[in-house]
Image (cartoon, grey):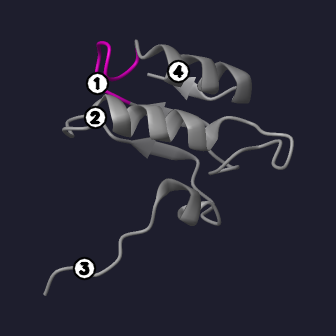
Amino acid sequence: MPHSHRPSVGQVSGLDLQLLSLNGNQIGDAGVAALAEAIQPTTANSAGALASLEGLVMDNGPLGVDHAKLKAACQARGIDLR
């Protein structure tokens, strides 16, 4: 039976997740940009989504560790992007 609703990144922000590994997935630019936006600190939420996240494992290249928005968001949060 297919899932009728899958949570977005912002909807899973209550998880106590310290390391997230997304390497080996086919995540496009829009997906990586959405992840970057979700973890970016905001005035309403200084930690962004996934507040306990300390490490993020992505593929090499522009849709992973070299994605400008993702790099900036991880730097702003002190998340180890590898």
Q: CA distance from mark 1 to mark 4?
A: 15 Å
C-beta proximity under 8 Å, tags 1 and 2: yes
Q: CA distance from mark 2 to mark 4?
A: 17 Å
C-beta proximity under 8 Å, tags 3 and 1: no
Q: Which residue is mark 2?
A: 23
Whether 24 is drawn above or below 72: the answer is below
Name which of mark 3 and mark 1 comes first in the sequence: 3
The quadrant holding residue 25 is top left
Is residue 62 found inside the magenta-colored segment of the image? yes
| Kind of residue indicated by mark 2 | Asn
Name which of mark 2 and mark 3 comes first in the sequence: 3
Q: Which residue is mark 1?
A: 59
Q: CA distance from mark 3 to mark 1?
A: 27 Å
Q: Which x, y percent locates residue 11?
A: 56, 65
At 54% from the left edge and 64% from the top edge, which residue is drawn? 12
Q: Which residue is mark 4?
A: 69
